[in-house]
Amino acid sequence: MKLKILVTAGDGIGPEVTNEAVSVLHEVAEIGGHKLEITAKRIGGVAIVKDGSPLPKDTLDAALASDAVLLGAVGGNEFNSLPPDKRPEAGLLQLRAALGGFANLRPAFAFKELAVNSPLRPEIIDGADILFVRELLGGLYFGAPREWNKAKGEAWNTMRYTREEVARVSRIAFELAMKRRKKLTSVDKANVLEVSQLWRATVNEVAAEFPAVTVEHQYVDAMSMHLMNQPRNYDVVLTENLFGDILSDESAVITGSLGMLPSATIGGKVNLYEPVHGSAPDIAGKGLANPLGAILTGALILRHSGALEAEAAAIESAVRKVLEQGFRTPDLARGNSQGLPVLSTKEMGAKVRETVKSQLLAASR
């Protein structure tokens, strides 16, 4: 099959990790006889510097003409003094809105080999496998009116949802739950927020279409605690935009590092894929970045945009195999009393590439 992918590597460590993800994708495509058409465009801070906009028109046009978009990360301290609508992050929000993807999928699963990296006890995280489904186009991030009035020393944002917005993301979450353990946890703050009361009522309406799925509701503050003391109790976790952003980042303690978390945004014209971590400008260009989140994001591209489940699973298996063999990037080497080999960004990418190649070739014999 043919897959047209736009790569917007962005800022900081974005180019480093996306290079490794693309390299693994090329390896998988070559072995499987698939054709990848990769185009690169600018977004974020680098686009502000070179093009005067965090989302240049040619980047957006290329995104809309693609089958999938792979984003590295955006942001940098030198842009913090800019107004919010001029910062690198504004380009990402504009891209999300233009592509129309409203369901952000963020898997978080425990790697037994990385248990030493987690502040949680191994028996708490062992076997944890959560899929966050975060609504991505509503809530505080997109609600209007919004303003920072510097003269008055005040600012405001609007949390707003419609029933239709909640229903469509809920339906995707329920459909995914049907393919997993048939359990869905919806997170809100319905004891305080009217928006959350609408959210909960709508989730219950959609739940009637999926009687095989067990549904529970949790307040966001309680859920933030439950993720830390009983993560194995959860399967699909459905949240609004802000809550999902925070809770899915918190789940990095399950995986052992924020650098292990991939994501996919589906439901719109073109799916958008990005590792959950940020641009980490303090380590950019030093070969210290963990590319595994980006590589696992590449697996999601194959699964959701290419319908290549076997190839996606092969990448995920290769990542686990490399970890089982003891290879680590610096963020995964905390507590490395065993003297495990610590690899650079490129070395870790190469190790995954070699492993997935050997696995796919062995499977084809």
Image: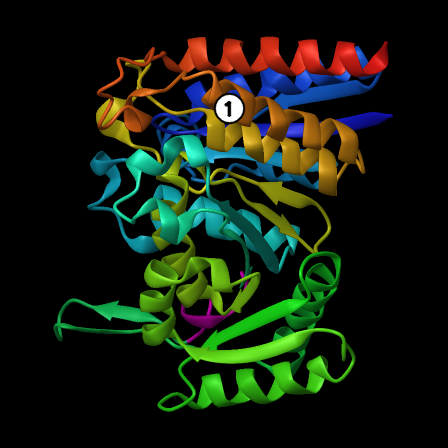
Determine which residue is flagged by label 1: 18
Can residue 65 be seen from the camera position used here? Answer: no
Q: Amino acid at mark 1?
A: Thr
* Residue 78 position in % (x across, y down): 21, 35
Residue stretch rendered in magenta on the structure: 135-144
User: Where is 231 relative to 275, above or below?
Assistant: below
For image coordinates 37% across by 41% down, the residue present is 88
The image quadrant of residue 149 is bottom left
The image quadrant of residue 63 is top right
User: Where is 36 relative to 30, above or below?
Assistant: below
* Residue 68 position in % (x across, y down): 69, 37
Q: Is residue 15 left or right of residue 171?
A: left
* Residue 169 position in % (x across, y down): 64, 68
* Residue 228 position in % (x across, y down): 33, 59
For image coordinates 70% across by 41% down, the residue present is 64
Q: Assign a secondary structure to mark 1.
A: helix
Q: Main secondary structure of the magenta part?
A: loop
Say which quadrant the C terminus sits in.
Answer: top right
For image coordinates 31% across by 15% down, the residue present is 285
Say which quadrant the N terminus sits in.
Answer: top right
Q: Is residue 30 left or right of residue 230?
A: right
For image coordinates 57% across by 38% down, the residue present is 57
**138 in magenta:** yes
**308 in magenta:** no
Can residue 144 be seen from the camera position used here? Answer: yes
